Amino acid sequence: MNSATRIAKEEWRQWLRSRLAVLSLIVFTVLLFFTTVLTTLDMQEARHKRLHQQEQAEETFLNQPDRHPHRMVHYGHYVFRTPPPLAMFDPGVDAVTGQSIFLEGHRQNSAMFADARAKARTGGFGGLTPAKLYYLFLPLLIIALGHGVILREREARTLGPLLSQGVSGERLYRGKLLALAILIGLLSLPALFSSIAASVLGESPLASVMLYLGNVLYLSVWTALTLCVSIITRSRGVALGVLTAFWVVTILVIPRVGVTSASATLPTEGKILTDMRMNDDLRKLGDGHNAADPAFAKLRANLLAQYNVERVEDLPVNFRGIVASKSETDLTQTLNAYAEKRMQRERAQAVHLAAYGWLSPYLAIGGASRNLAGTDLETHHRFLREAEAIRYEFVQGLNKAHIEKLSYIDDINRNKGEEGWKRARVDAANWQVLNDFRFTPDQAVDRLSRATSKLVSLLLWFIALLGIGLIAARRLTP
Amino acid sequence: MTAIAINDLFVNRNGTEVLQGISFTVETGSVYALLGGNGAGKSTTLLTLLGFLSPHGGSVTVLDMDVTKQIDRLRRQIAYLPEAATLYPHLNAYENLEYFLDLAGMKTTQTQLDTTLDEVGLQAESRSRHMDNYSKGMRQKVAIALAILRETPVLLLDEPTSGLDPVAIDEFNALVRNLAELGKTILMVTHDVYGACQIADRIGLLRRGQLVGSFNAIEGEQIKTDLVHAAFAERANN
């Protein structure tokens, strides 16, 4: 057994003989175990439920009887964002952004059913996930167990005999580092379990492995920092104070400052104001339900000229359907412009906040973890875009049926008795315009590329702290 | 034969010249006591011998090795007992000894451990108890046992009898004398004049970083009184 291993073994013996250390280890192990199991079950249930709901929504839409096509436009459809397998470790924005959208004509609805609203009723504790436990609380365990690894030798006056019998500061450092590395390795087992389980459920091994390694890297940063402080400071009280202050600043203060700074530097317009401006713009486009709206006069004139007829009743296509289709196109462009602007602003704020990750390992790992798990803001935006694409596609598909399968005369006479209502229906086979929607995260390589800068910042933190620790260890004196 | 040779040694600590050109030698198999009051430079001398402080003038050799150049090799030849040696409180005497010896790359048998602990006078029933239950004298015995087991030719003791009761001091002094007779070279720093005279072959008197006197301990009882006055004159005058 080499000296580093022997020192590490001795450190573990000390921890296992300390009631406080054993109690802390038991509490964290139990907490990690239950949080991992519960979040895994929770996410699995959500995954199955949303997949089932998606299938059900599609089935319900497709099973609608013969109807007027525009009624189907308003009947609408639901899309669900199925959580990716790694959400069992880090559900990310899933809990706050909503997970399903009601799609209908002329509107872009917000995502709804955000879990955070439901969990707020349980005091927020229901939101404890493995990622939160690892990123927020495990550093505290590392601080509690690690702050004294060198200082205890100094305070017990065993440092002098150790160093004077030829155990160099560097060897001591390696031994203590090994002890803490074993601790991290053991505490990371639930994260490893999540990664393996996610891969079994279809997640890319690259994303799973990188998420696991990112987590280990983050804990290594805390280990290197704790060891560094244990070498440099002269009393356990000071070391504990310094490390706790670092925890408070990097985990509580910097993220808050980052969010405030992002909001102040890149302010977003309030939803009410945006909606009012957007509605003004939409009104200018005309009412797609009203074919006589002056906004469509030019369209009417062009069509009449194109088909060389005098009245819309004589057109070979349903003019009301064409108006609905044109209106949907114009309206979607406006809606998309507003949505893109909002998403770009949110993205810019996220980038602004991510820059604070160079100052806070917590922010860096949080961002990288959501990127790799496929539960980040970018993924949510892609969900919104894909949902919008499917909305536009099926609405226009129905408008096409409106144009081609329903005559203008039948359409305008739809409210004239039972017969008029019956004649204004099209065959239910036309509802097949709806495509299947299965939301999946980006390719692992793309997710990794988004996480790279954050992982690099963690790596630099680790290398810098390791370097400082090694230099301090080489100069270690009793 | 000279085991430790300090020649015109200057050492700075935190901008203060703590040792100002001290010189003395310690012969192999002898006990040298370095006496002095607080801040005289006693511990600085030991830390320099261990290579933890670098001299900015003069030379220090132990067993013909220059401490500034061959410290890694040299540390394997030195056992150091800091003031109030506590060792690891959560370990018993055996575990402490095994750990330190493991790190020194030495393997010992249970019989060797027991023989050595017998030699230093640690009661058999205490050996399996955690050291947080040990008295200071008992801890000193384990520390000495470690030095014996490591078979180092040189022992550096920092205030070894401070805080010990008279019986423990007598036992400790006897132990140190015994080690010297076995050929170990012992340098101890202390402010216990009477204890030093009892066991040291030679006594150096350190004041304000300078060696103001050097005596053979057997030069008579009068010397003790003189030493007290010489070493602690400043305190007496204050």
Image (tube, rainbow, N blue to C red):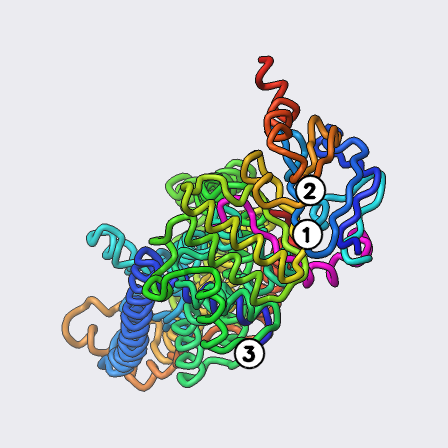
Q: Are marks 1 and 3 in contact (CB under 8 Å)?
A: no
Which residue is most to the top?
B238
Report which residue position mark 3 lands on.
A206
Vertical comparison of B17 with B167: above or below = above
* Any part of residue A171 in sight: yes
Which amino acid type corresponds to the residue marked 2 in the rendered image? Arg
Which of B203 and B19 lies nearest the eye of the viewer?
B203
B152 to the left or right of B164 = right
Mark 1 is surrounded, within 10 Å at the Cα level, by few (under 14), some (14 to 19) or many (20 or more) other residues, namely many
Between marks 1 and 3, how big is the CA–CA gap? 68 Å
Q: Which residues are magenta?
A: B65-85
Which amino acid type corresponds to the residue marked 1 in the rendered image? Ser
Q: Residue at x 52, y 36 (%)?
A: A264
Which of A364 and A100 lies nearest the eye of the viewer?
A364
The chain letter for the residue carrying disc 1 is: B
* Any part of residue A345 in sight: no
Could you say which disc has been placed on residue A110 in the image? none
Q: Earlier in the sequence, mark 2 or mark 1?
A: 1
Q: Residue at x 54, y 67 (%)?
A: A178
Tell me, yes or no, whether the highlighted magenta stretch contains residue B82. yes
The quadrant the N terminus of chain A occupies is: bottom right
Q: Position of residue A15 (x, y in %)?
A: 39, 61
Q: Position of residue B94 (x, y in %)?
A: 43, 68
Q: Nearer the viewer, mark 3 or mark 2?
A: 2
Report which residue position mark 2 lands on.
B202
Tag 3, which secondary structure? Answer: helix
Report which residue position mark 1 lands on.
B30
Q: Residue at x 59, y 45 (%)?
A: B199
Between marks 2 and 1, how big is the CA–CA gap? 8 Å
A313 to the left or right of B11 = left
Q: Are marks 2 and 1 in contact (CB under 8 Å)?
A: yes
